[in-house]
Amino acid sequence: MPELPEVEVIRRELKEKIEESRILFVRVEDSQFYLPSDMILGKKINKLERKGKNLFLVLEDESSIFFHLGMTGRLLFSSREEPFPYLKVLLGLSSGFLSLTDQRKLGKVALLTREETEELLRQVGIDPLSPEYTEENFEKVLSGRKMRVKDFLLSQRYISGIGNIYASEILFRSSIHPEKRTNDLTPEEKKKLFITIPQVLKEAIAHQGTTIRNYVRSGGEQGEFQNSLLVYGKEGERCPCCGEKIVRKKIASRSTYFCPRCQMG
DNA sequence: CATTCATCCTGCTGGC
DNA sequence: TGCCAGCAGGATGAAT
């Protein structure tokens, strides 16, 4: 569900609401989502950081509360306590209430030391919206691999933040077949991919993310980018470029949508 | 080392 | 109407 754009929208919204506020109480509603309240009580939230789909509330002692929303996780900010369905963790803050809900329970929350945070950040691949995302670094992580390009995009260890929706959208807009092997990409295709990845992600952020099923913003509102999708979820519909029928195929055991005519390369 | 697949969860939808 | 297979925006660890 939440891919990079959705997590970034939430980060920006929460930054306004909870940065500089203090943690007054912690309530864990499901032991699968444990947070040690005695370690964080009274501490100030200094900043909110994101890498890929990972979100960190960095506290004043440089420990951080780490969130990964999995498929159905939500982070909701409210000025009063609300009985959200599937509530897992509630943080009472000096500025309001932050609720983590998760229907399918595939998300994660943890308190990490500064060292653990740095270690996790090292394991996550290049964030396409960070200064680390250069053509040189892109080439470095791509070279030598023989993966299908869709698997490459979905893996979080090389480039982070891309999930199933944006993988299809990025490959369509790059005119590359999702099963093409990374070592068979031409220099032009690599260049196109390098440029298209942040383009699509930024556009999605500008539209507040993609709501298809579960994703909502921190105030409960839906995103808008679902209206700008060109191929994802459009099996049998006409390709906006050539009119050919959009195909759905399982690749990497996930539904993948593409135009068999525009994406022959 | 690289790659694929089952697994963790719950709930909804569509076909029979 | 009821039932069940299949599907869903993710990631990991085990097997090959």
Image (tube, coloured by chain):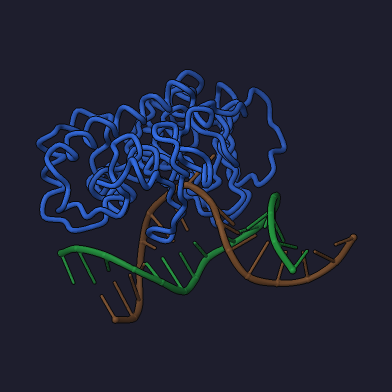
Chain colours: A blue, B green, C brown
Using the image as rendered, state which of residue A135 and residue A258 is in the foreground.
Answer: A258
Q: Residue A120 vs residue B16: left or right? A: left
Quarter of the image holding residue A254? bottom left
Q: Where does residue A39 sit, x and y in percent of width and height?
A: 44, 43
* Residue drawn at 19 percent across, 28 percent down: A131
Residue drawn at the location 11% of the way across and 55% of the way down: A144
In-front residue for pair A41/A110: A110
Front-lying residue, A90 or A234: A234
Q: Position of residue A85 (x, y in %)?
A: 69, 43
Q: Total number of numbered labels?
A: 0
Q: Is residue A141 visible?
A: yes
Residue at image point 39% right, 58% down: A251
A36 or A89, which lies in front?
Answer: A89
| Residue extending furthest toward the top | A16
Q: Can residue A116 be seen by looking at this rendering?
A: no
Viewed as shown, does residue A86 lie left or right of C11? right
Q: Position of residue A12 (x, y in %)?
A: 43, 23
| Above or below: residue A10 compared with residue C9 | above
Location of residue A91 by image quarter = top right
Residue A124's spot in the image, x, y percent?
A: 27, 46
